[in-house]
Image (spheres, grey):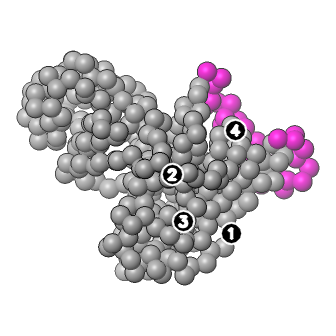
Amino acid sequence: MKKITAVIAALIMLSGCAGQKTDDSSEKTVTKTETETTETETVTTAETVTTIEAVTSVDSSSAEDTSSDIEEAKKKEFEPLYDITPMLDAFRSGDRSRLDEFETEALEKAERVISEVVTEDMDDYQKELAVHDWLIAECTYDPGELRVIPKRTEHSDEPYGALVLGKAICAGYSTSFQLMMSMLGIPCVLIHSTDVENEEHAWNAVQLDGAWYYVDVTWDDPVPDKTGRAITHEWFNVSYDFLSERHVMTEDCPQTESFANSFEIREATELESIEQLADAVNNAVSRNYDTAVLHITDSSVIEGKYRLTKEWMFWNEDVVALLKEGTGRSRNPVVRSKLTKIDDEEYVVLYIN
């Protein structure tokens, strides 16, 4: 889905379907405010596959500086994305006689992945997280799409590319994610639109406990990719408002009415003493995550509440020692931090290098 020229080839990692992750050593403060509850029509059920297409409206908070790009996006017409319905029908009925060899192999791989990463004791959030993390670890953004003259790998825009070949563009990531969510009975839609730079893009929305969250698996998988790279969750279970800062939302995109299953809330460590910092960081490293999330409700735990900035951590010997202990590294492993506010509660996200 990338169309690049030699002039902008070096910027490919910063736009479009390419994985989004940049090295930003400055402290960032991001506030996620709960969206006003509105009645939204249920977009999908576990028995329905839905793709939301055609850009028709955007969140006004993100439109101010990108109005021209958004107007251009509204004029775009896209080719339909890969239809996973035949694979889902075959999965539910057990009859695969109507699938071609690529669909059959992709479905069999999806079943193996689910059996490997999902256990009966998991709730829907944990199942979703396991599938997301598997895709990040086992699939890479199609390198052919990143060439000065793009030469896309065959099947990279469908589940066969992502699941079997391990190479995909945004269409491959998002259709694979929707396929496995649907197989698990988790309501999931595919959204086909553009980013705010007017690059065609696709991502997903999932419904957990009656509330909708947004997931961009493609942008959570950085480029260039490499084996063993820590997994990021910057675009996992984020809100409508947060996603719309970089994505052009369609008129049917549901609002986010709860943050209970956001990554920050579900993965946060309640830091009751500074000594627990080492355990929190160690837990993230052991899972090969590039972030550790802290929820500090007692301001006395850390001097100058939430002063977990890069500079403060580098100069505070006690904190540096705990971070080194948690990662087993000789240098300070945290490159930056972010303060996120969710439902009036503050969370600190530490980015581990």
**Viewer-proximal residue, 57 or 14?**
57
Which residue lies under the disc numbered 1? 80
Tell me the mark number nearer the camera, choosing from 4 and 1. Answer: 4
Query: 293 left or right of 138?
Result: left
Disc 3 crowd, CA 10 A, few/some/many (<14, 14-19, 20+): many
What residue lies at 17% left-to-right and 22% top-to-bottom? 301
Marker disc for residue 250: 3
Q: Compute the Cα span from label 1 to label 3.
A: 15 Å
Lower position in the chain sequence, tag 1 or tag 2: 2
Tell me the mark number nearer the camera, choosing from 1 and 2. Answer: 2
Mainly helix, strand or loop, the magenta region? helix
Please state, as top left, top right, bottom left or bottom right, where the N terminus lies in the image: bottom right
Q: Secondary structure at mark 4?
A: loop
Which residue lies under the disc numbered 4? 185
Q: Which residues are magenta?
A: 92-121
What residue lies at 76% left-to-right and 42% top-to-bottom? 108
Query: 113 left or right of 260?
Result: right
Query: 244 left or right of 142?
Result: left
**Viewer-proximal residue, 319 or 56?**
56
Disc 4 crowd, CA 10 A, few/some/many (<14, 14-19, 20+): some
Q: Compute the Cα span from label 4 to label 1.
A: 24 Å
- Residue type highlighted by circle 3: Thr
Above or below residue 51? Residue 316 is above
Q: Compute the Cα span from label 2 to label 3.
A: 16 Å
Marker disc for residue 38: 2
